[in-house]
Image (cartoon, rainbow, N blue to C red):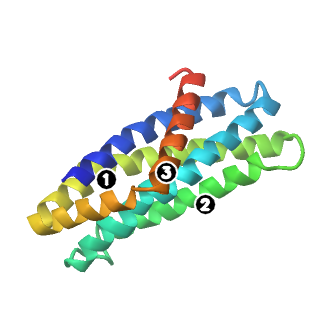
Amino acid sequence: MESLKVLVAEHRFILRLLGALQRWAEDARRDRDTMQRELDRFVEVIEGFVDPIHHGKEEEILFSTLVSEGFPSTHGPLPCMLAEHTRCRAYVAQLRRAAHAPEAWDDLTLGGATTAALQYAELLTGHISKEDHMLYPMAQRFLTPAMREEVDRRAAAFAEGPLQERALGLVALGERLIAEFGL
């Protein structure tokens, strides 16, 4: 399935971005003012690409197709993956609040931001491993060839037009962050 190859490639980018975010958390204690602005750039990539584009393709196309074809939705990997997406969004909300704090960070805000960044990175890293090594292979086996083609068609359509242009800009920003944080 071409769409699964794209999702796995996006995972490779996301893992590199998470590595940069972890480095950001390590460096944040040394230069609070700069790191607060840098966190805003990470949040921009996560809220603009990771969640709506990557997780959007998973939830709206792959997961919904699996459920429509009889894949269990109340137990097994899908509810786990969806719950982890929700937990990721909660961490990102914490990161956004910290990045947009109206004043310079105090120790509490700094600690909350770095903790949320590290927990988000840990959660999403494990999540990606489960998808790559368990869920995606299961989807490949479960879906018929016709359904795999339908998922590929829908995923390609999802990524076209203005969304694709936005995705390219956000990936470019993510690549700059990855380079800036030495990964």
Q: Is residue 114 in view from this perspective? A: no
Residue where numbered disc 1 is placed:
131
- Indicate the secondary structure of the residue bearing disc 1: helix
In the rendered view, would you say 70 is above or below 12?
Answer: below
Q: Residue furthest left?
A: 145
State how many labels appear.
3
Tell me which label, 1 or 2, sits earlier in the chain: 2
In the rendered view, would you say 9 is above or below 136?
Answer: above
Q: Looking at the rendered structure, which numbered label has been put on residue 50?
A: 3
Residue where numbered disc 2 is placed:
90
Q: Residue at x 40, y 51 (%)?
A: 127
Counting from the top left corner in percent of width and height, residue 80 is at: 38, 65
Give amino acid for label 1.
Answer: Glu
In the rendered structure, the answer to whether residue 15 lies left or right of residue 72 reads: right
- Indicate the secondary structure of the residue bearing disc 3: helix
Tell me which label, 3 or 1, sits earlier in the chain: 3
CA neighbours of label 2 inside 10 A, class few (<14), some (14 to 19), many (20+): some
Q: Nearer the viewer, residue 168 or 124?
A: 168
In front of the other: label 3 or label 1?
Answer: 3
In the rendered structure, the answer to whether residue 183 lies left or right of residue 64 reads: right
Q: Residue at x 54, y 43 (%)?
A: 170
Residue 76 found in image quarter? bottom left
CA gap, disc 1 to disc 2?
A: 20 Å
Give amino acid for label 3.
Answer: Val
